[in-house]
Image (cartoon, rainbow, N blue to C red):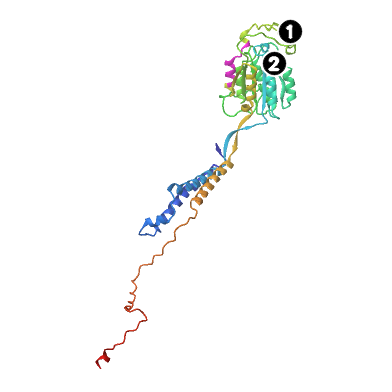
Amino acid sequence: MSLTWPWALAALLAFPLLLAYRWWLRRRRRRETVRVSSVTLIRAALPGRSLWRRRIPLWLFAAGLVVLAAGAARPQASVPVPNNNAAILLAIDVSASMCSTDVKPNRLSAAQQAAREFVEDLDDGTRIGLVTFSAIAGLLVEPTDDKDTLLAAIDDLKTSRGTAIGQAILTSVDAIAEFNPDVPPTGVEVPPATGAGGEYEPDTIVVLTDGRNTQGVDPVTAAGEAAARKLRVYTIGFGSTEPAPSVCTREQISGDAAFRGDGSGGPFGGFGGRGRYMQADEGTLTEVADLTGGEFFKAEDTDALTEVLLDLPDSISLQRENVEITAWFALVGALFVLAGLGLAQWWQRSVAVPAPVAVPAPGPAPPPAPAAPAASADPPGRADPPDYSVWKRG
């Protein structure tokens, strides 16, 4: 990950400033606290709130500020993105060993079927170039997005003698150099590659072969030229290790007269005479792929070859580019801030609290109230009886 504006990381100071402000605010509240005689009564009158409920909103808010501050620096991530300008050079082996019937109906027919499905499955606009090689290598179709042209060329493949894997790689490099100015042709000297890794050109070479190099440039030497130009080479070793007759149709045989002496048994069939050339050189193909940053695949039948080819675009059509991800930082930071504020408001919402009892301030005691007069023993409304003692004495 890289930063477009690294100086904007100064916004991260918002987090310690927030903590400092919280510490100052709590210290100020402690100085202004009113001492009361009974803290228990105060706690009983207030709604209870646990310690974690007080801290979670604060930490969510602080985390949101940190993420937003990091997003202000405009971070960029190296992510795989599709590159429609990339081209795939598919180099197919059309040597005599492709007539082997260990893969039904024969290796060439199986390779043609897999190549057709590969082309048809590609997204519209993807450019494919077709290179064929036997004793020599040639560019059969320049990189194009015309699927009909590619399919017609694949259906017209013909076998011949010899296997020049190295020359096929160099031919593919030159085909890429024709439309990619960043790739020098093979006639231009370039510094050798320091090893696989780093940034690669979007264009890729795929080599499909069932044998080993018999003439021309060594494949590892050719792979060094591709690696120096940051071109990846993916290799596919096709065919089984079981000996089988070599049978090709008339349409699959070229007009090369020397072909009939290649051990293929003539145009109508026979057994191959040089078995070691009818098996893929997995060691060399693996070295070529490793040197260029590609990958080696082994396919022993039609289904395996089709699966390998159909899975290739997921790897070779994606290039790593620096993409700005500021929006994601802004989104995550905003979610943290909103979550903190929302939880704080929810947990501090108003609840029914008992009304406080007014306590009079301390002062001088009030004078005692005057005593009430003593109540009469007689019931109210009854007069005293008259005194008749005077009359009796008289």
- In reply to whether residue 283 is colored magenta, the answer given is yes
The answer to whether any part of residue 168 appears in the image is yes
Residue 385 in the image: state x and y as whole percent: 31, 85
Image disc number at residue 109: 2
Tell which of 286 and 392 is nearer to you.
392
Number of numbered callouts drawn: 2
Tell which of 204 and 155 is nearer to you.
155
Residue 389 in the image: state x and y as whole percent: 26, 89
Q: Nearer the viewer, mark 2 or mark 1?
A: 2
Q: Quadrant of the C terminus?
A: bottom left
Q: Is residue 113 above or below residue 96?
A: below
Q: Is residue 79 left or right of residue 17?
A: right
Going by the numbered disc 1, the residue's amino acid type is: Ala
Q: Residue shown at 36%/79% (left/top)? A: 380
Which residues are drawn in magenta?
Answer: 278-289
Q: Which residue is mark 1?
A: 257
Q: Residue shown at 44%/59% (left/top)? A: 354
Tell which of 131 and 64 is nearer to you.
64
Q: Quadrant of the N terminus?
A: top right
Q: Are marks 2 and 1 in contact (CB under 8 Å)?
A: no
Q: Is residue 22 above or below residue 313?
A: below
